[in-house]
Image (spheres, rainbow, N blue to C red):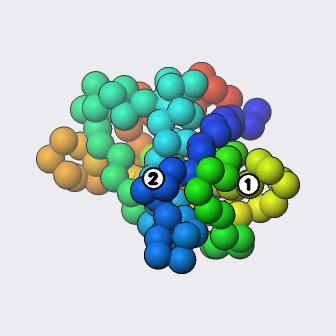
Amino acid sequence: MELSESIKIRVRFSEVDSIRMVWHGNYVTYLEDAREAFGRKYGLEYKTILENNSYAPMFELNLKYKQMVSVDDELIVNITFIPTKGGKICFKYEVYNAKNNTLVLTASSIQLFTDLNGNLEPMPEWFEEWKNRNHCNA
């Protein structure tokens, strides 16, 4: 079963650079917004991770820019959970310009788990239960 979510974002004036295109770093925020929406939908919120005495710091983030967008463009950010073995959260993303359905950006991310002292947790028990509950084991 594929777990995914989509959100819409309207580009604000404060998010564009001197050439009136979305500054590249703002896409990281858009991806974070999608991760938060995914977490709310599937019970994998940062609050839930913390309540289980874990952190999920970003380990790897890859972005590929395909098309520029500007102020007032509406973006659709799609996020999909990628099942893997072990204790890591992997996502792939696609960002589209809603006006013409043009692919703007593709991305992927990997988050690893640590305990509250920063020690790596290979597979937190609560996360294994979450994966089983959501039928998303590799």
The residue that appears at 49% across and 55% down in the rendered structure is 13
The residue that appears at 28% across and 25% down in the rendered structure is 51
The numbered dot on residue 121 is: none
- According to the image, label 2 marks what residue? 29
Kindly give the residue lying farthest to the right in the view shown.
100
Q: Residues within 10 Å of mark 2 (few under 14, many from 20)?
A: few
Question: Which amino acid type is shown beneath numbered disc 1?
Answer: Tyr
Task: Say which of 89 and 41 sits in front.
Answer: 41
Question: In the image, residue 130 lies at what x, y percent?
Answer: 52, 27
Question: In the image, residue 10 lies at what x, y percent?
Answer: 60, 45
Question: Which amino acid type is shown beneath numbered disc 2?
Answer: Thr
Q: Residues within 10 Å of mark 1 (few under 14, many from 20)?
A: many
The residue that appears at 33% across and 28% down in the rendered structure is 47
- According to the image, label 1 marks what residue? 96
Quadrant where the N terminus sits is top right
Residue 86 appears in the rendering: no
Question: In the image, residue 105 lies at what x, y percent?
Answer: 67, 64
Q: Rounded to the nearest whole Å, what is the CA distance between mark 2 and mark 1? A: 15 Å
* Mark toward the start of the polypeptide (2 vs 1): 2
- Disc 2, SS: helix
- Disc 1, SS: strand
Question: In the image, residue 101 lies at what x, y percent?
Answer: 83, 53
Whether residue 123 is situated above or below residue 132 in the rendered picture? below
Task: Specify whether 48 is left or right of 95.
Answer: left
The residue that appears at 40% across and 62% down in the rendered structure is 59
Residue 54 appears in the rendering: yes
